[in-house]
Amino acid sequence: MDKKKFARVAESLRKFQRAELKEFENELGQKPVDKVYVDPLEGEAVLETVLSGNTTFLFGRKGTGKSTIISRAQSELRKKQDSLSIYLDVKSINETSQTSSVLSNFSENREVVLEIIQPHILRKAFLIEIFTKLIDELDSICKKTSIIDRFLGRHYKYEELKSEIDLLKERARSGVLHNAELPILQTIEKEVKKRHQEGLKRKDNAELAGEASISKASIKAGLKTEDVEEILDDDEVYEKYSKAVLRTFPYQELIKKLTDLLNELSFSSLVIFFDDFSELTWIEQRLFVDVILAPLNNTSDEKIKLKVAAYPGRAYYGNIDPSKIDILNLDFYHLYKSSDVQTMEQKAIDYTRRLIENRFLAFGIRPEDYFSSVADIKDYYILLFQVSFNVPRLMGHILHSCYLDQVSRNEKITLQSIRLASRKYYENVLFQYFDRKNRYATEPFSRKLDRYNQKLLLKKLTNESKSLKTKISTGEVGGKYFEGLSNPPVSHFTVYPTLEPMLASLELNFLLTKYHEMRDKSGNDVSVYCLNYGLCEDERLAWGYPKGRRDDRSYFVQRCFSYNGVVHQFLASTQTIKCDSCGATYPIEEKEKIEYFDWLCKECKQGRCKVTSLSDDYIKELQNLNEDLKLEEVELDILEILKSEGREMRAGEVSALIDKSHQLVGWRTTKLKENDLVEKESKNNVTLNKITERAKAIYFNDESESNLKT
């Protein structure tokens, strides 16, 4: 038993990283990703799809292997002489643009308030930075490869293109506004002014009667980032805004010059991989597509091929026609969808086996040497699939926990130790998505409220499963169908497809997972979801369905597993429909009727209605929180990693585990040090970070955490 090699296997799976696995080159050779890559489908069908000549959107939750597939595809493309490939980490580029010296000194005598100009300039800086990075990467690749001679012959064209981008960047950083931008920014300010005025009117009607004017100082005092984003959510306002931004960028001309350069270099195509696309805000994402992706996709004469990695349900296509592109979803249900559960599971478990066996083999060890012979090795693959749903990063966390608890002590892994690792991951990582972030993260109130409502919904679903377990055990529901089941599995439930959007955030964060689609006993289409395995372990709920029963295929469609009523009751208690103008509210049951009339308010006939989350209790809870203790979300993530790892860490080590750039981690840890939350120490010219006792006492107090689930 080689403990160190097992630890490296787990580490290679669990890290957020640019998937090339460069830190493992000593063990795996010069091209680690080629050695460890295992395609989710037989015949490397996923890789072949990504390598096709079509624009491709690759969907998957965090850790599903999108970056690994991209890295493997790039490895193949580099072998070709007639094409180039470029990788752009969209999130990192966005972070760099936000933390650089983009914002210069702005004059307060502008025609638009500073709070509207600043985010606008930052968005422009990000878009320019994307194109800058693209050109820089092209230059770097050409200089590193055998095409250097032909590239140098055309280098003047590259320099011309580069100087135009630099000029755009300089204009953005200096805050120069284009004539096309000013009118729409003034429109946005006018809308902010209108909403601010209406809010004050509702607060004190007598004070602001008629057409009372609102000063810029007054707007500034009440203006929040989410106010502007809500205004830009209006399709009509956004369309004007995006067109104005597009007019300030001569992208059509730049793209033409780029394709001309590729032609002169005798390349058939340039493949651009855009990773972490969904990490952008909704407005940034839409602008990114409308200003960058769509023009590249639609006006490059198919010279430029786009490959975009995104989260499920978090993608905007804009003017890109979805019917003309390839769409791949890496979540197991979509990859292995079949008419019956068993066939789907067999395909998924086979991938688990191939992934584990290949990864162990790459490091020169065998799975059989680390898993107890008390159970068959196939049983371990089945359980690893169930606790991770084939998400390599989750699998890495499970194996890392097993390393700490068993392998490091020369003990072999058992089925029970995998279940315990799943429970620990749920308690220490997944559940913290709700509590620590909601308590201490600096973010828009609407996001906190949405997360709080998700927590309530998950609790309601879990309580329903616990109640159902009791009712089945006592014979209150199910009749003879459940006879002989001493511990009936209640982890899965069904809802109508129309309710799937209500579960999307919980699924994105691995607290729920879509498992299957089928028809219920009434012939209606239903979607089968399941609770996280670790959550079920925590609540002592049996996971799965009874195996070996003659009618086990119909287990999920028993009427007691229909949770449509549960979700509807939750929505009725936590959501309402509210007019953004007069403030009138309507019950959620009237949604379809109001939506039919294009969300027009039937009271004032002017305002637009939208679904709003309600929680008076939570508003009171937030008011009691100490604002001084709040941190940016990334800062909380840094503290969580330093706490969970329990050791001194380099910025690069932390960044690999939280999916942020090491530069950003370095800047944030410096800020945390100033607040006595992180200690920094230099050893052998390397700066190491360690969480302070003060930070542990404030953000990881054992007593407060024990009450998180109540």
Image: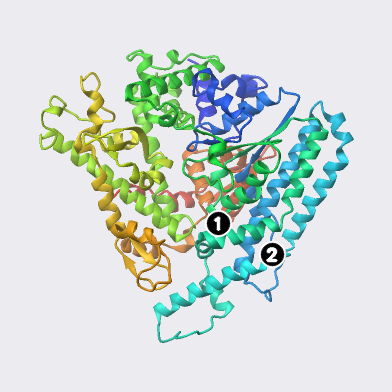
Residue 167 % position (x, y): 79, 55
Alpha-carbon neighbours of circle 2 within 10 Å: few (<14), some, or many (≥20)? some
Residue 261 % position (x, y): 81, 38
Q: Nearer the viewer, mark 2 or mark 1?
A: 2
Give the side of residue 205 with respect to residue 170, left or right: left
What residue type is disc 2 on? Ala
The residue lying toward the viewer, choosing from 3 and 682, is 3
The residue lying toward the viewer, choosing from 453 and 535, is 453
Give the side of residue 399 with respect to residue 52, left or right: left
Residue 360 % position (x, y): 51, 18
Secondary-structure class at tag 2: loop
Give the side of residue 436 with respect to residue 143, left or right: left
Q: Does residue 374 show up?
A: yes
Q: Does residue 509 show up?
A: no
Q: Is tag 2's residue or tag 1's residue first in the polypeptide sequence?
A: 2
What residue type is disc 1 on? Asn
The residue lying toward the viewer, choosing from 571 and 423, is 571
Secondary-structure class at tag 1: loop
Give the side of residue 395 with respect to residue 255, left or right: left
Residue 608 % position (x, y): 43, 66
Rendered position, 256 above or below 674: above
* Residue identified by numbered label 1: 675
Picture residue at 35% right of the left edge, 26% below the top: 417
The residue lying toward the viewer, choosing from 310 and 245, is 245
* Residue identified by numbered label 2: 180
Calculate the distance from the C-alpha at mark 2 to the C-alpha at mark 1. 43 Å
Picture residue at 51% right of the left edge, 72% below the top: 222
Label tally = 2
Rendered position, 706 above or below 478: below
